[in-house]
Amino acid sequence: MNKVRFATAVAIAVLILGTAPSLFAANSSATGGFHLTLPGGPTNIEFEARATDATGSGNGQMTFNGAAELPDADEDSGGQKGSFSNVFIKVDFDCVRIEQNRAAMSGLIRDANVNGYTGRRLILTVEDGGEGNNAEPDKFTFGVYNTSAMNWIPSDSELRFDDGWSMTWLATDSERQDDRGVQITRNADVDCRSFSFANYTLIDVPQGGGNIQVRP
């Protein structure tokens, strides 16, 4: 009887341990809101995102309200550029990647009050500095990218049987031992998996300007 009970306990423990990683990934989230003052005036950013699996799938939203410097314009859609004091952008996230205290979230701009930005992709990257008086500052950065379809395959002309860029691979920073890398695919659109966390230059959220929480 003791052997049966022991075997049953082991089986239950293995089952729990075996399912823990998927539950862990599904509960990963990043939320926050903060404001800062730019040369054109005050700016507010609010976001919430949740990872639905360990491959980058996820959902959530982000809103941007306030001053912004729009550095370039999409000429095909009559995009605007320059300094604006009342920019509004809403993003629906479809990609969420969380590692320890950092999160990268990306999605399509669904609504914007500036020409040429609806339909572009935005990546928001944040770092949770912790809580309490001795915590490090929270950090963030974001970028807006054009969507583009890739209908050509780069290949090595000296290799007769080179299939070109038809597979995926893992790109890492060789100088960072803690860099887990990102999976590179043939998809030309940027998303939360396109860049390693080591590639982002993060900006401090001003003290008392808000709070970022990342739950891996």
Image: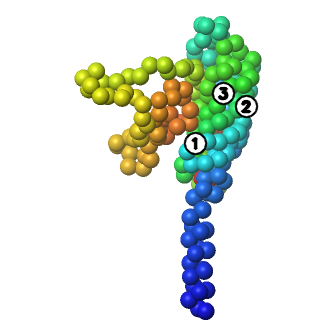
The residue under the point 56% across, 71% down is: 14
Image location (x, y in percent) of residue 90 = 73, 28
Quadrant position of residue 60: top right
SS at badge 1: loop
Q: Which of marks 2 and 1 is nearer the N terminus?
A: 1
Residue 101 shown left or right of residue 199 in the figure: right
Q: Mark 2 sits on what residue?
A: 63
Q: Which of 167 and 47 is in front in this view?
A: 167
Quadrant position of residue 37: top right
Residue 8 shown left or right of residue 174 in the figure: right
Distance between mark 1 and mark 3 Cα atoms: 15 Å
Specify the farthest residue to the front: 161
Image location (x, y in percent) of residue 157 = 28, 21
Q: Which of 185 and 11 is in front in this view?
A: 11
Disc marking residue 32: none
Q: Earlier in the sequence, mark 1 or mark 3?
A: 1
**In the depicted structure, whether residue 21 falls above or below residue 170:** below
The crowd level at tag 2 (other Cα within 10 Å; few <14, some 14-19, many 20+) is some
Mark 2 vs 1: CB contact within 8 A: no
SS at badge 2: strand
The residue under the point 61% across, 26% down is: 121
The residue under the point 59% across, 86% down is: 4
Specify the farthest residue to the left: 158
Hey, what amino acid is under mark 2? Thr
Hey, what amino acid is under mark 1? Gly
Q: Mark 3 sits on what residue?
A: 108
Distance between mark 2 and mark 1 Cα atoms: 21 Å
**Front label number (2 vs 3):** 3
Q: Which of marks 2 and 3 is nearer the N terminus?
A: 2
Distance between mark 2 and mark 3 Cα atoms: 12 Å
Q: Mark 1 sits on what residue?
A: 56
The residue under the point 68% across, 25% down is: 109
